[in-house]
Image (cartoon, coloured by chain):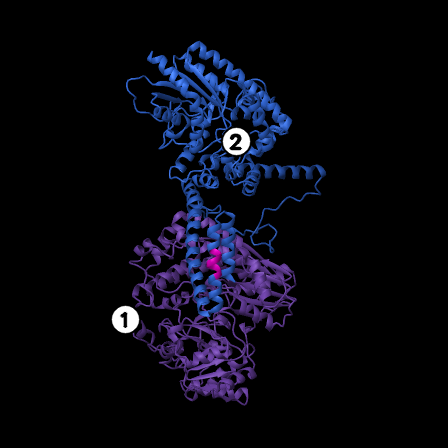
Amino acid sequence: MNILGISAFYHDSAAALVQDGVITAAAQEERFTRKKNDADFPKNAVAYCLHAGQVGEKDIDAVVFYDKPLTTFSRLLRTYLRVGPRGFRTFHQAMPVWLRQKLWIPYLIEKEIRELGYTRPGKMYFMEHHESHAASAFFASPFESAAILTFDGVGEWATASIGVGRKNTIELKEQLLFPNSLGLLYSAFTYFCGFRVNSGEYKLMGLAPYGEPRYESQIRDELIKLRPDGSFTLNMRYFDFLGGLTMTNHRFDELFGGPPRVPESELTQRELDLARSIQVVTEDIVLRMAAHAAEITGERNACLAGGVALNCVANGRLLRDGPFERLWIQPAAGDAGGAVGAALAGWYEIYGHPRSADGVHDAMAGTYIGPGFSDEEIEQYLRSHGYPYTAAKDVQLWANGIAALVAEQRVVGLFVGRMEFGPRALGHRSIIGDARSGAMQSTMNLKIKYRESFRPFAPAVLAERAAEFFDIDVESPYMMLVASLRQNHRCGVATDHPDDIRDWVNEVRSDLPAITHVDYSARIQTVNREQSPEFHAIISAFDAITGCPVIINTSFNVRGEPIVCTPEDAYRCFMRTEMDHLVLGPFLLDKSQQPEWTDDKSVSADLILD
Amino acid sequence: MRQIGFGAVVFGILWLLGRHTAAIVIVFIAGSVAIACALSVRTADGVERLIAWVTSIVGRGLSYLLLGLVEILVFTPVAAVLWLVRRDPLALGSSPNDLSLWRPSFADGRTPLYGRQFTYEVPRPVVGRRSTLGRVAFVVGTVILLLLADLGVGSIIDAMKSSSPESPTALTSYYRGVAAVPKAPWWPSVLLDSFQQAYVGQFEPLRGFDFPRNLSGPYLNVTDGVRRSYEPPALGTRKPVEVLFLGGSTTQGAFQRDDYTIPSDIARLATGDNIPIHVVNRGQYGYDIWQEVELLEELLTSGYRPGVVVFYDGVNDLSIQSTEGTTTIPSHLKAQEYAQAIAQYLHPGSTQPLVNRIVDAYRNRSAIALGVSDVSSLFTSHAPASSKKLTPLQGNTQSPDQSIPTAITRANDAVSIYLRAVQLIGELAAGYGFQVKTFWQPFLYSKMPVVAEKNIEGFEGESPPAWFAMAAQARKDLRPPVIDLSDALNGIKAPVMIDYEHTNELGSLAVAKAMYGYLKPVLTTDLDKHQA
């Protein structure tokens, strides 16, 4: 049975295919169109999924959309009734899109699928937005039963929901309704600090350790009215997102001492403190919600999804201080993951198939469910373009060679196997480097990623040795948890921090300076042999050479660009940055041997600042 | 292909609207562009870009306009009301002061609606198979709801139509096709003012109905029921002959300027003959001779003493036989309508079967009926709906029998009634000491046909042969002292008929000249009497 899940038309559109209960393919549309956060119908992603699953032209049994458009539309209309003529600026932008597109989603889906050469799907279903998130969290998790917590900006009406999953069913028990939204609260600060809403939130999270929670009381006293159970109301006097073009208004400016930071301008202490303050409040809300969820569900395990679940600092706090023994967080926690959730909900909830879970293995297959390219396809690409390369004779030699380059402080682009689904690169579309290098963080940020250098890189560590370096006793294969570097790897730093945040971040404060944040925290990926044998082999080889089982792992892209999908994307990114080597499957490319790159566009020409 | 398709659509719309020249120009332009595009790719690209740019601008403008209207007409008023009653449309039953903001899931306790685009619906009670009675009740209820909706929408449309006066554009465009219409700048004003009078007739207990006693316009003025007429210069010290004109709209001068009505032309002709004259034009839309007699009696009893009284009638007297049914007693064009209204007031429900009244009431307010009527009028007549009602200025009902024998009977009866009035007028003239002339008017069915007048529509779609027969029979029945002016318009090559009874100013002058031939001796006699 082939069930196609689709999320689209808001941001991060994606498609996923579940075949007889197994997620066989999933991808975000942005990876194909190269438009960051592409919200259009995921035609390319759907085509990929159906092709990867070898689905016959008449064999799509059901399409499940991740949202209920008419309910969302009713919320939109009520919003405009609330704001009156003030909302006309967004009303005249939103209504044509709804009238032309979003009210006709079933017909649009059918038309697009027909254009791909497939017949009309047998059935079409619509899940609630948070039901899709919940399904992506629970049905993909290793748990037989668990509490479910989802939170994001907004779905139809819900902004957060609490439910419980048992075997093949999900029951959403409670929901927090628009406009009271933790996601929108966090996004308001993202906007105010000069980052792009819906993509810059992780920057705000990365900025938080530099600041002090000086504005925490203003947030608690003025912006929200927080209840003990984690529910809260937003004081809409300070926000403009109901009918305006911005997230916040002049009262917000007055509360926090001036207008929003202009994007790309210098970061000031105010932004650092705001980031820290909202992070503290967010963690508090998440903890309270989790406590309430544990109370009403009686479960000891929890599954998380929704955009806020990408806040791995809050996740780490929840793991340490929360009421649950185990956490599983959907790696594609954002809206893209809704496609997976919708498809899984179709299989389990709509069609009622049984589900079994062993408590250990999840259903995401390491997230390596995106497009992959055979060695022959990659070699054909390289030969046809005349790009020089060397081929490894076996996996071990291949891994040793890459590890040696990393140990020599080279920056290596890694393109192996199937692409990851979700926002994190987990070793198949990654840029890797030596975590021991004091200069590596700055080098990779400025010469390869073209981004602000205050953000630390994430470490990829062999799962079996993670506890030696980090204060963590569970696996974090999807880079969804933050843990502290152990004391024995830290070194003392001056208590007076430099004024310039870039000097501050470059201070050496551990024997793994490139991945150590100013508060010694790190966003960890634990790599196990079973899920990612190639990546595990590289780190093991690096460990064998250096005695260190930790390397830098960052996504294979530059700022504002989606993660690379094809060998062509990877080669282009490789040549347009100062990366030293590129690994394309079994083939290794040395920048110094490549023909001169004739693409006249600079990297910045393609950038959409995020 | 896009240009051709676009051009075809515009052409079709313009053609249907009667803008044939514009349609042909569009075809020419679209054809030229299509040929240019076929010959040059660059031109085609440029045209495509231009079309895209224009449609983008237009689309954006329309979007702003339409959404602005929705915002202003719907969202803002509702938002204001909600704000006034302190109701938050986003609250969904919760209050900011609640101890917890967590709400039960929407689908809580309800069947999940996986196949729907909305979250939940209120579950319907499980009932068994609906009984026959239930099904009938369901069908009847549905029909009633649909009928009520139809009536509601129809009432709104009707109210909107009633509140807006007839579009000048619609009126002028209808009369643009009439050959006798003057190509003069004053015509639209006269046309609209003529209709303005016809709109506001009201009940009058003695004469049946009355039209506005005062009206002011650049070319059409009525003061105390008297249409302004040509004021001749004083001719010495002789006291002018007071000539009272009574008649219908043709006497009053519908579609003619104040100074070019029949009475004005008579005044001008008399002045040319050095006869001092003062004409009083009391023509009233729709009047027949008996209403005029009544009006004359009112004037006489109030002390008014004319020297000469002129009656100019015919068409309305014949039409009464159509609107009121064949009758041998004096009546007027709205007698039946008023009688029904009075009867309905006195005995509700007794004037016509209940079913008929319900059907009539429904038909008058049904959106579907109004729509069908409007659509069918596009294909059956060029006249706007209300101008059809107004053009004859004589009511709405048409005779059920349009056979020639009936037409002859109607003519006989009409003339019989008319002659009795003439006899009474003679007695009044003798009693009050004024002179009188009674003229029988010419109209479309009694004059010699002119080719340019062949498109003029008759009385409410009645059979022209019946009218020709009726006109001919009436002429046969007329007796002195009635003067038959049916031939007055013959011999004029130019079209004079604006509709089946009203003429342009050329026509009215021809009638005045014919009339003056009979009036001049009378005027002279009256003048001599005063001089003596």
For residue A156, above or below residue A28: above
Proximity of marks 2 and 1: CB atoms separated by less than 8 Å: no
The residue drawn where x is 38% and y is 57% is: A247
CA gap between label 2 and label 1 equals 107 Å
**Figure quadrant of residue A311:** bottom left
Which of the two marks, 2 or 1, is nearer to us in this view? 2
The chain painted blue is B
Which residue is more in the foreground, B75 or A356?
B75
For residue A171, above or below residue B75: below
Residue B428 rendering spot, x and y as whole percentages: 46, 12
The amino acid pointed to by label 2 is Lys
- Specify the label residue B447 is tagged with: 2
Which residue is more in the foreground, B337 or A262?
B337
The residue drawn where x is 33% and y is 20% is: B276
Which residue is more in the foreground, A465 or A240?
A240
The amino acid pointed to by label 1 is Asp
Residue A568 rendering spot, x and y as whole percentages: 48, 79
Q: Which residues are magenta?
A: B26-31
The chain painted purple is A
Q: Is residue B30 magenta?
A: yes
Q: Regarding mark 2 in the picture, which secondary structure is present there?
A: loop
Do marks 2 and 1 share a chain? no
Q: Is residue A104 magenta?
A: no
**Residue A137 visible from this viewpoint:** no
Question: Mark 1 falls within which chain?
Answer: A
Where is mark 1, residue-wise?
A499
For residue A384, above or below residue A53: below
Furthest residue in direction top, as rendered: B431
Residue A265 rendering spot, x and y as whole percentages: 31, 67
Quadrant assignment for the C terminus of chain B: top left
Q: Regarding mark 1 in the picture, which secondary structure is present there?
A: loop
